[in-house]
Image (spheres, rainbow, N blue to C red):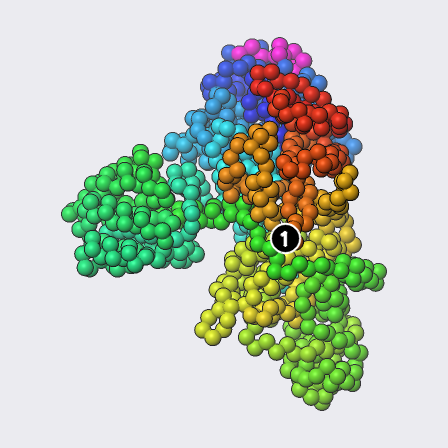
């Protein structure tokens, strides 16, 4: 349901407290006291048949007796009457209820339902929204609302805090009050029976009073994953979203048929999901508020190269160590910068980064050195530090650089070390809105928050390069292999079958032959050429190396026959219940400089399929060098996944070992991503090892586990993939054929060229403005859409140069509750009145109708007669808005 009726919870004009009490130690008593003390100006109506008045306020015996319908009710009663109260409130017209009562999911109500299920059933006919149950409540200080049993009041601010844990809520309130931190919203989700993280992120993401959103998360439900990802990505595009995710070290041990399943780990998956959503993850309260303060006070990073300026060698070394250990990058100064610093500073200065100016550096030296660093284009951010010195007092140095720091065009962080004197300096920076930290480590941690936030934002706005080659899979070949295994009631594909599936999607595999006995193995080995590898073939043995089921580098017929006989005897003895179907023989891959990698997928219980990349080989689980990502992947996302592993540095080449073909690895990851979208039966997959060198990639071994599909491939993903099924060729009235498909991130260059061909008048009609200078970030936003909530169909055709050009676009942005979709359409100015607009409108109306969207709506300038004529042709209702010079148009789909 998402944001529908959330205004009743977060901006109520009146509140009823059901279960209000004069007992100061009861929840109903505390909630009433908090509401009366917080300055809420609307009616506060206690409901309790036991009292005539609560806290001096006239009390009503039941919901029916209330003089006005409350926008929101707070329920503080026992659990058994909650469903009936929800029914009464729904009939009365209340649309928001905060249920503080706990235990609803543990008690049966009737017909086998829990009280919580009965509560939701009673709320559904009235579209009544429920916060909780088992929550602390909520605070909206800006309107004087404290509908909680929290122990303290807080002031207004621009931060929103949302938590699943009531205990963490009250601890955070106490901590924030001591530090003078205010909030726009403070929300306890409790059990999230109805209102969940996705709903609240949708609401807060567009709330103008909220500048940043802070989350405390324990878990989300499997049915929430896609909504959470869509809402989080939308919110993170508008403002910083930060999260503390607890439960990092919970052992999620389970029997896994693949290395990928054993390596992925639930916390790694959460981490990948949060990165993909553009959310910055932190690990404690101090770090949470430090990080949001840093992001709020700093200029955006243009890169990741940090310069360090200090008057003490020790602090500079500590900062450098912290930077490198956290994956940061020191800036390399230009020759001009080195020369200017040498002219300014004593001969004993450090002659590099960090810049140690020596202990007697005064305020003017700080200023002059900082100016030099600001002029160097090789520097993206600067950390300025100070150790106490009697010769150059810390406060003087701080006052000296304040004006320069405020005027700087790149981020500058400060760290003045020490106690009393340094504390005064830090207050100077804080009052000037300059990020300041008491230790080098904290300052570097803040810089790395900026780096990680920038990386996450780039994931949301990156323009992926084209794949090095277009691959056309043969889905039928993969499907037939998988269906055969399922008909035989097998979950594990044989190695040859697994390689057939990979080959169907263009992943290079080593040729593998199946044989039944040692003699046949020797014969086949001679036919394909030595040296060869011999492996046991058994549906009961997953990791062949672990049981002595692999023999490598066999050079003669006798070696092959002997190895097969020995292998068969060993496994028959040690694993008498294992069914041995024979052996596989494959030619040894002669790639002496290749790296052994692992590429795989497994199915997470919450986020669905995830893709893993890392260092492979037999010790893969011991080395545990891996990173995971959520599909779908493109070239940029694949490259980012690779970069998050330790083996990435080796893959870039060293000494006489050349860099690997990164495009080939990225393409393999994309091909795997497409495979798991197309084949929902695949629940686990390993390619280990995947050889990678400068010549490309080669899959040497593979295992695949399949089960009957419960849903389509795209539906099981947390992020809806590119909907290829919506592509079609359309013939215009002139006979010209155009290809219509959903927009993709790779379309950004063509989309930019398309917009450049729109006339100023058409720009005015679309309310874009007359400038074509659209920032790259905004252009990226136009082509990088969330297919679960947005759609943009483009019409393309070949141009004279043989490439493809964009001719027209129609787009909709659907409300989270799917009640309406805002639309816009634009046809290239020289192609108007060719039928393109009509064709695209037909396409979009059909799409919205198939999704069950309530209506398509839009705003059109009153003098845009062509658009008004087009929409009237389709039956849009038109309502003129005289004061704005616009018309509101609406097409009802239901």
Left-right relation of 669 to 289: right
Q: Which residue is tagged 1?
A: 801
- Residue 696 lies within the magenta run: no
The answer, for residue 353, to whether it is visible in the render is yes
604 to the left or right of 636: right
Question: Total label count?
Answer: 1
Displayed quadrant of residue 68: top right
Q: Where is residue 191 in the image (x, y as percent from the top left)?
A: 61, 36
Measuring from the top left, give residue 345's x and y in whole percent. 20, 54
**Magenta segment:** 57-68
Question: Looking at the image, is 417 positioned above or below residue 538?
Answer: above
Q: Which of 316 and 800 is in front in this view?
A: 800
Give whichever of 684, 780 is nearer the camera.
Answer: 780
Q: Position of residue 493 (x, y in %)?
A: 75, 65
Residue found 68% across the figure and 59% down from its top: 471
Residue lying furthest left = 391
- Quadrant assignment for the N terminus: top right
Considering only vertical position in the picture, is 522 above or below 856? below
Residue 804, above or below 865: below
Q: Is residue 136 visible?
A: no
Give the residue at x 75% y 73%: 537
Q: Which residue lies furthest to the right in this view?
A: 487
Please tell me whether mark 1 sits on a helix, a strand or a loop: loop
**Residue 137: percent from left, percent from top:** 55, 28
Q: In which quarter of the image is the C terminus?
A: top right
In front here: 45 or 486?
486
Q: Dividing the picture into quarters, in which one does residue 755 lie?
A: top right
Q: Is residue 64 one of those drawn in magenta?
A: yes
Report the residue at 74% width, 55% height from top.
Answer: 679
* Point 49% across, 73% down: residue: 657
Q: Residues within 10 Å of mark 1 (few under 14, many from 20)?
A: few
Q: In this view, does 573 lie to the left or right of 188?
A: right
């Amino acid at each position: 349901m998402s944001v529908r009726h959330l205004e009743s919870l977060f901006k109520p004009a009146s509140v009823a407290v059901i279960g209000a009490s004069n007992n100061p130690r009861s929840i109903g008593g505390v909630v009433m006291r908090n509401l009366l003390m917080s300055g809420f100006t609307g009616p506060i109506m206690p409901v309790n048949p036991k009292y005539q008045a609560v806290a001096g306020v006239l009390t009503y015996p039941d919901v029916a007796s209330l003089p006005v319908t409350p926008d929101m009710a707070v329920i503080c009663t026992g659990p058994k009457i909650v469903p009936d109260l929800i029914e009464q409130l729904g009939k009365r017209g209340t649309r928001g209820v905060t249920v503080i009562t706990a235990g609803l999911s543990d008690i049966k109500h009737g017909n086998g339902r829990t009280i919580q299920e009965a509560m939701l059933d009673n709320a559904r006919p009235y579209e009544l929204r429920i916060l909780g149950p088992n929550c602390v409540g909520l605070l909206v200080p800006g309107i004087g609302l404290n509908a909680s049993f929290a122990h303290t009041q807080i002031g207004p601010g621009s931060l929103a805090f949302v938590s699943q844990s009531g205990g963490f809520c009250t601890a955070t309130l106490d901590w924030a009050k001591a530090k003078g931190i205010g909030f726009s919203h403070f929300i306890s989700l409790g059990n999230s029976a109805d209102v969940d993280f996705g709903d609240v992120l949708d609401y807060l993401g567009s709330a103008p009073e909220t500048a940043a959103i802070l989350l405390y998360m324990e878990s989300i439900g499997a049915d929430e994953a896609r909504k959470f990802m869509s809402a989080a990505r939308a919110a993170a595009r508008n403002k910083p979203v930060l999260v503390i995710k607890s439960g990092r070290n919970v052992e999620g041990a389970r029997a896994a048929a693949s290395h990928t399943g054993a390596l992925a780990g639930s916390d790694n998956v959460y981490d990948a999901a949060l990165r993909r959503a553009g959310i910055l993850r932190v690990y404690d309260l101090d770090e949470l508020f430090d990080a949001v303060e840093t992001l709020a006070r700093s200029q955006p990073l243009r890169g990741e190269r940090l310069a360090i300026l200090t008057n003490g060698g020790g602090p500079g070394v500590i900062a450098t160590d912290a930077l490198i250990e956290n994956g940061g990058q020191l800036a390399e100064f230009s020759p001009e910068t080195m020369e200017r610093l040498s002219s300014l500073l004593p001969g004993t200065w450090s002659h590099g980064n960090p810049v140690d100016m020596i202990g007697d550096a005064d305020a003017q030296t700080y200023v002059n050195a900082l100016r030099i660093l600001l002029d160097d284009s090789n520097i993206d951010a600067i950390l300025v530090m100070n150790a106490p010195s009697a010769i150059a007092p810390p406060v003087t140095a701080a006052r000296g650089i304040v004006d320069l720091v405020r005027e700087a065009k790149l981020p500058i962080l400060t760290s003045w070390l020490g106690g009393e004197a340094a504390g005064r300096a830090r207050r100077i920076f804080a009052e000037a809105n300059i990020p300041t930290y008491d230790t080098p480590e904290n300052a570097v941690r803040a810089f790395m928050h900026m780096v990680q936030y920038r990386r996450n934002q780039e994931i949301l706005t990156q323009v992926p390069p084209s794949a090095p080659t277009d691959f056309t899979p043969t889905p039928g070949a993969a499907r037939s292999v998988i269906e055969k295994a399922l008909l035989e009631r097998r979950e594990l594909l044989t190695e040859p079958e697994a390689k057939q599936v990979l080959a169907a999607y263009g992943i290079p595999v080593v040729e593998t032959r199946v044989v039944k006995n040692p003699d046949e193995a020797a014969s086949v080995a001679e036919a394909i050429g030595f040296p060869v590898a011999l492996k046991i073939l058994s549906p009961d043995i997953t990791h062949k190396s672990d049981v002595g089921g692999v023999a490598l580098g066999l050079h003669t017929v006798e070696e092959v026959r002997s190895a097969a006989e020995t292998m068969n005897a060993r496994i028959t003895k040690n694993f008498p219940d294992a069914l041995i179907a024979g052996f596989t023989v494959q030619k040894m891959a002669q790639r002496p400089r290749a790296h052994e990698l692992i590429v795989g997928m497994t199915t997470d219980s919450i986020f669905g399929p995830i893709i893993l990349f890392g260092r492979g080989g037999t010790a893969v689980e011991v080395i545990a060098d891996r990173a995971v990502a959520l599909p779908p992947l493109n070239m940029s996302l694949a490259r980012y996944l690779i970069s998050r592993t330790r083996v990435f540095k080796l893959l870039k080449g060293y000494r006489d070992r050349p860099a690997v073909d990164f495009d080939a690895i990225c393409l393999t990851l994309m091909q795997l991503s497409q495979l798991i979208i197309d084949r929902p039966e695949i629940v686990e997959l390993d390619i280990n090892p995947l050889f990678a060198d400068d010549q490309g990639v080669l899959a040497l071994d593979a295992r695949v586990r399949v089960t009957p599909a419960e849903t389509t491939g795209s539906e099981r993903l947390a992020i809806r993939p590119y909907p290829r099924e919506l592509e079609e060729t359309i013939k215009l009235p002139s006979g010209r054929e155009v290809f219509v498909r959903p927009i993709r991130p790779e379309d950004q260059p063509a989309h930019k060229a398309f917009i450049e061909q729109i006339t100023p008048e058409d720009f005015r009609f679309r309310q874009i403005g007359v400038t074509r200078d659209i920032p790259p970030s905004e252009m990226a936003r136009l082509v990088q859409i969330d297919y679960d909530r947005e759609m943009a169909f483009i019409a393309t055709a070949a141009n004279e140069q043989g490439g493809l050009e964009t001719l027209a676009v129609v787009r909709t942005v659907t409300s989270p509750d799917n009640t309406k979709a805002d639309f816009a359409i634009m046809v290239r100015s020289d192609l108007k009145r060719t039928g393109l607009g009509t064709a695209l409108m037909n396409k979009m109306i059909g799409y919205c109708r198939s999704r069950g969207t309530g209506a398509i709506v839009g705003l059109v300038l009153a003098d845009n007669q062509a658009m008004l004529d087009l929409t009237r042709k389709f039956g849009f209702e038109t309502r003129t808005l005289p004061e704005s010079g616009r018309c509101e148009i609406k097409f009802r789909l239901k």
